Image (tube, rainbow, N blue to C red):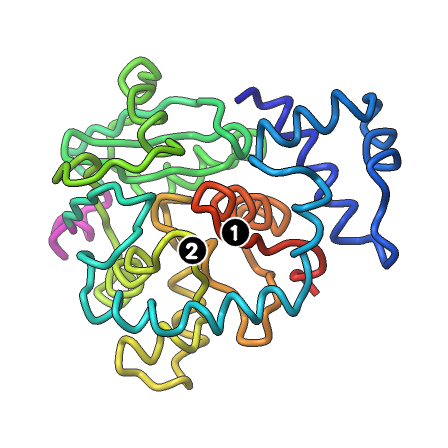
């Protein structure tokens, strides 16, 4: 999927988030991006798997609340099972290795981090990895992504190597479920003990479901008053999409506060939902 297609979809979603009722017609949406209705609908359906009309039908605050209610029992079982829970990253098996506190404090000293910039269904991403696994996946604004990673690992040796990172992109963003393949993707995580707990909890959220900051706090036995601390750890997640912080929303059903943009979060939830064949969360969930 070309980055140009995502840019077009992103522009449409921006309109939908801002636009009051009534919902725009297919003609209006197509005109807004300078395409014929036929061409626009074909590109949109190729990207998200459903028509613009069907996509918009579920983009409501009530749809978000319905998704939260429907997710509750599934999430309880998934949190209890930890990383063996169902549906993580379309059933890809994830192997997580955490740095030791000593390694983390060294700021990457003695560590080689390979990185490359690639097109994804959600725009350009920068993928960072070591010989022990993926350590970063960011959606950059200019060179901001690289600066964040350099600051995170100030003493690491960064090597630009897109040929080394490219093979992992198709795995990370595959629409196909890959089952019973242990260690398909390995993550190499550095963070505080609490951050690591939250990031592992995120990996337990099944694809196509939603959770809240308060629910995650409760799963970590913090009580709902821990939601703010959980939000901070979610915001510090270094591996976008793969550690699915996009599946966390407010208790009210509102979508906001995503590190790489509210519109991108909506796009991820809609794309993911269409892959899983379940109703999509769409318009005004951001309110």
Q: In which quarter of the image is the C terminus?
A: bottom right
Between residues 195 and 107, which one lies in front from this camera angle?
195
Residue numbers of the magenta segment? 98-107
Q: Name the residue under label 2.
A: 245
Q: Name the residue under label 1.
A: 259
**Residue drawn at 72 percent across, 29 percent down:** 41
Q: Which residue lies furthest to the top in this view?
A: 163
Element under disc 2: helix
Q: Where is residue 148 in the image (x, y as percent from the top left)?
A: 43, 41
Q: Tell me if residue 4 is in the magenta stretch.
A: no
Whether residue 197 is situated above or below residue 274 in the rendered picture: below
Whether residue 162 is situated above or below residue 220 in the rendered picture: above
Do tag 2 and tag 1 residues touch (Cβ < 8 Å)? yes
User: Whole-Å distance between the Cαs marked 2 and 1?
Assistant: 9 Å
Circle nearer the N terminus (2, 1) = 2
Quadrant in the rendering for residue 203? bottom left
Q: Where is residue 15 in the image (x, y as percent from the top left)?
A: 79, 45
Q: Residue 175 carries which label?
A: none
Element under disc 1: loop
Neighbor class of circle 2 (other Cα within 10 Å; few <14, some 14-19, many 20+) is many
Between residues 100 and 269, which one lies in front from this camera angle?
269
Whether residue 38 is situated above or below residue 70 in the rendered picture: above
């Amino acid at each position: 999927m070309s980055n140009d297609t995502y840019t077009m979809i992103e522009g449409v979603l921006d309109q939908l988030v801002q636009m009051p009722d009534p919902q725009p017609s297919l003609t209006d949406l197509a005109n807004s991006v300078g395409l014929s209705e036929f061409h626009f609908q074909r590109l949109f359906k190729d990207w998200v798997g459903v028509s613009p009309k069907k996509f918009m039908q579920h983009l409501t605050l009530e749809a978000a609340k319905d998704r939260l209610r429907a997710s509750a029992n599934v999430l309880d079982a998934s949190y209890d099972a930890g990383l063996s829970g169902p549906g993580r990253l379309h059933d890809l098996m994830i192997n997580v290795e955490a740095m030791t506190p000593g390694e983390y404090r060294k700021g990457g000293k003695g560590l080689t981090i390979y990185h490359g910039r690639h097109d994804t269904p959600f725009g350009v991403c920068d993928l960072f990895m070591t010989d022990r696994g993926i350590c970063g996946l960011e959606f950059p604004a200019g060179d901001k992504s690289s600066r964040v990673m350099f600051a995170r690992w100030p003493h690491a040796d960064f090597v630009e190597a897109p040929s080394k990172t490219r093979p992992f992109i198709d795995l990370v963003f595959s629409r196909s479920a890959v089952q019973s393949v242990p260690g398909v993707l390995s993550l190499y995580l550095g963070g505080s003990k609490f951050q690591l707990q939250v990031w592992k909890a995120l990996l337990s959220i099944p694809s196509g479901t939603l959770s809240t900051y308060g629910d995650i706090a409760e799963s970590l036995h913090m009580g709902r008053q821990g939601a703010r601390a959980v939000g901070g750890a979610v915001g510090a997640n270094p591996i976008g999409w793969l550690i699915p912080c996009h599946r966390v929303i407010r208790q009210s059903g509102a979508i906001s506060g995503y590190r790489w943009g509210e519109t991108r979060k909506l796009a991820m939830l809609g794309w993911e939902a269409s892959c899983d064949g379940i109703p999509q969360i769409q318009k005004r969930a951001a309110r």
